[in-house]
């Protein structure tokens, strides 16, 4: 345990914190204050500001991930299934059709979890924040209202040139390189190997054992 004297020595000169605070105050007082005349002058928002959530309905597959992961349970989704006839298929397939997609912004805490977990990029942040209402019930935005905010979504930031490419880009480049390499490879016609004649057995040397001359063979079996 440090004593009071040791604590004061370790903290520095008494009253130094007060002097530093007053220095910051005096420095701020010398600067000229600027006031933006809102709403006549629009504020300069930082990039990727979290204003309102926009819905791209054609990308939604009704996977319900956003509704399940929402900590405030402010997303309400209803859907039904329809049969789609696929040419060449043995039986029709089923697909989910979105009937209702509502977000209650009176409960939303703008955590962005629903946007992060969406696997098909159906939800996006929009910098628009001017959607206040006189009635709290009007803060429940349906899918038509959420779809109107898609036009205000800024384009995504450019990729870092020093960063690693995305997995999707790497996989697409790998697939494109396979047919290109096969097309650039020269085709060599297949050459069948020539058939060589079968080797004949070597002729027996004259005078060898078991080998007789024509005269001997002709004279075999005749009496002497």
Image (cartoon, rainbow, N blue to C red):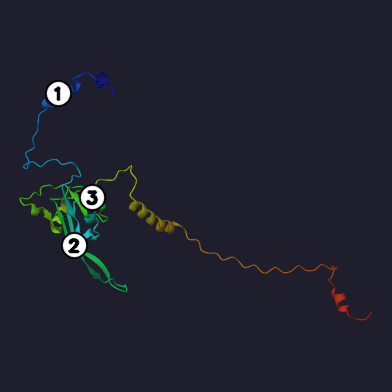
Q: Which residue is mark 3?
A: 113
Label located before the other in sequence (2 or 1):
1
Q: Estimate the x, y position of residue 34 in percent, counting from the top left.
A: 9, 33
Q: Estimate the x, y position of residue 68 in percent, counting from the top left.
A: 23, 55
Where 211 sits versus 23, above or below? below
Crowding at mark 1 (Cα within 10 Å: few <14, some 14-19, many 20+): few
CB contact under 8 Å: marks 2 and 3: no
| Placement of the C terminus among the 4 image quadrants | bottom right
| In this picture, residue 165 sits left or right of residue 44 | right
Q: Which residue is mark 2?
A: 78
Picture residue at 12% right of the left edge, 55% below the top:
140
Q: What element does badge 2 sit on?
A: strand
Disc 2 to disc 3, C-alpha distance: 20 Å
Of residues 144 and 163, the one nearer the viewer is: 144
Q: Residue furthest right?
A: 224
Disc 1 to disc 3, C-alpha distance: 42 Å
Q: What element does badge 3 sit on?
A: helix
Q: What element does badge 1 sit on?
A: helix
Disc 2 to disc 1, C-alpha distance: 59 Å
Where residue 82 is drawn, which disc sits there? Answer: none
Of residues 80 and 204, the one nearer the viewer is: 80
Q: Estimate the x, y position of residue 128 in percent, counting from the top left.
A: 14, 48
Label located before the other in sequence (1 or 3):
1
Residue 221, by quadrant, is bottom right
């Amino acid at each position: 345990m440090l004593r009071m004297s040791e604590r004061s020595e370790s903290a520095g000169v008494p009253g130094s914190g007060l002097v530093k605070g007053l220095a910051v105050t005096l420095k701020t007082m010398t600067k000229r204050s600027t006031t933006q005349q809102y709403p006549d002058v629009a504020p300069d928002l930082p990039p990727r500001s979290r204003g309102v959530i926009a819905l791209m309905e054609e990308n939604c597959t009704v996977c319900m991930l956003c509704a399940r992961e929402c900590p405030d349970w402010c997303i309400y989704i209803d859907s039904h299934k329809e049969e789609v006839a696929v040419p060449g298929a043995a039986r029709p397939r089923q697909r989910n059709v979105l009937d209702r997609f509502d977000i209650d912004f009176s409960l939303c805490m703008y955590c962005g979890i629903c946007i992060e977990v969406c696997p098909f990029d159906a939800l996006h942040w929009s910098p628009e924040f001017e959607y206040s209402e006189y009635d709290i019930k009007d803060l429940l935005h349906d899918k038509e209202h959420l779809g109107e905010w898609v036009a205000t979504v800024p384009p995504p930031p450019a990729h870092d040139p020093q960063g690693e490419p995305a997995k999707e880009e790497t996989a697409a480049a790998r697939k494109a390189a396979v047919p290109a390499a096969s097309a650039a490879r020269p085709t060599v016609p297949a050459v069948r190997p020539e058939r060589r004649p079968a080797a004949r057995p070597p002729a027996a040397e004259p005078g060898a054992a078991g080998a007789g001359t024509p005269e001997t063979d002709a004279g075999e079996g005749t009496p002497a």
